Amino acid sequence: MSGWLGRFLGGVPKGFTGTLEREEAVVASAPVRDGGHLVATSLGLWVPTDDGPRRIGWHLVSKASWASGVFVITEADEVERAGDAVVLADRAPQRYVVEQPGKLPQAVHRRVTGSIRTRHRRELPDGGAWFVQRKVPGRDGTVLQVRPDPGTDVALVRDIAQEVAQRMGEGLADA
C-alpha cells in the first residue's frame, strides 16, 4: 500500500502523531514499550521522542541492529560539506524495546542496506574513514558520505572526500 490508500487502509499505526509526506508510504511499524512507535516508511524511520515522532532519513541511519527485543539505532548528523561530499558524525545509539516487532526488523534492514550503493574503507594516519555512496530517499542520484573514525584528522578526510566527490562527478571514481 502506498500514499493515501495505505493510510486509509490502516498502514499508519493508531496513535501515531507524525505527519507523513504525501508520497510517504508506511512499510512496517511496531509499538515501543515506553510509548510511541517505530514506523518504517519509504522515506525513513520514525522514532518516538519527547517532542513527538521524528523521521530519520534512511541515508542517515548509520547502524540498526535488532536482538532480544531491542532495536538499537545509530543516527548520523551531517556536520559539514566537503565539496559535493558530506562529512558525518554518529550520534549516541538509541535503544527501543519492541515486544511485537512484526516485519519491522526486516523492513529496516532492507531499507538501510538498500540505500547503500558502494562503500569503501580507507586507512589513514591516526585512524581511517568510511566512504559510502548512498541513495537519499525522495531524491534522484546519490550522495558521497564520509564518516571519519574518532581521532582521525578531519581536515585530511575532508580533502580526500572533496577530491573523490569531484572525480565521481567527472565519472572517474566510484568512491
Image: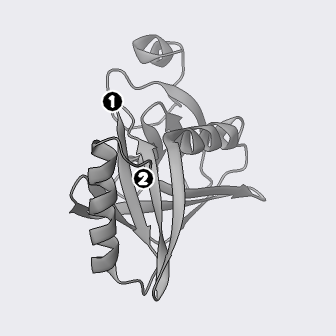
Under circle 2, the secondary element is helix
Q: Is residue 159 visible?
A: yes
Q: Which mark is residue 140?
A: 1
Q: Which mark is residue 126?
A: none
Frontmost of labels 1 and 2 is 1
Residue 132 against residue 24 in the figure, above or below: below
Q: Residue at x 46, y 13 (%)?
A: 8
Q: Residue at x 40, y 49 (%)?
A: 173
Left or right: 87, with 175 as reference point: left
Residue bearing mark 2: 60
Point out the tag, 1 or 2, that comes first from the N-terminus. 2
- Closer to us: 151 or 104: 151
Pinpoint residue 168: horizontal percent, then vertical percent: 34, 47
Mark 1 is surrounded, within 10 Å at the Cα level, by few (under 14), some (14 to 19) or many (20 or more) other residues, namely: few
Pick the quarter of the image with the N terminus.
Answer: top right
Pinpoint residue 112: horizontal percent, then vertical percent: 55, 45
Residue 109 against residue 5 in the figure, above or below: below
Q: Residue at x 42, y 16 (%)?
A: 3
Residue 120 against residue 59 in the figure, above or below: below
Residue type at mark 1?
Answer: Asp
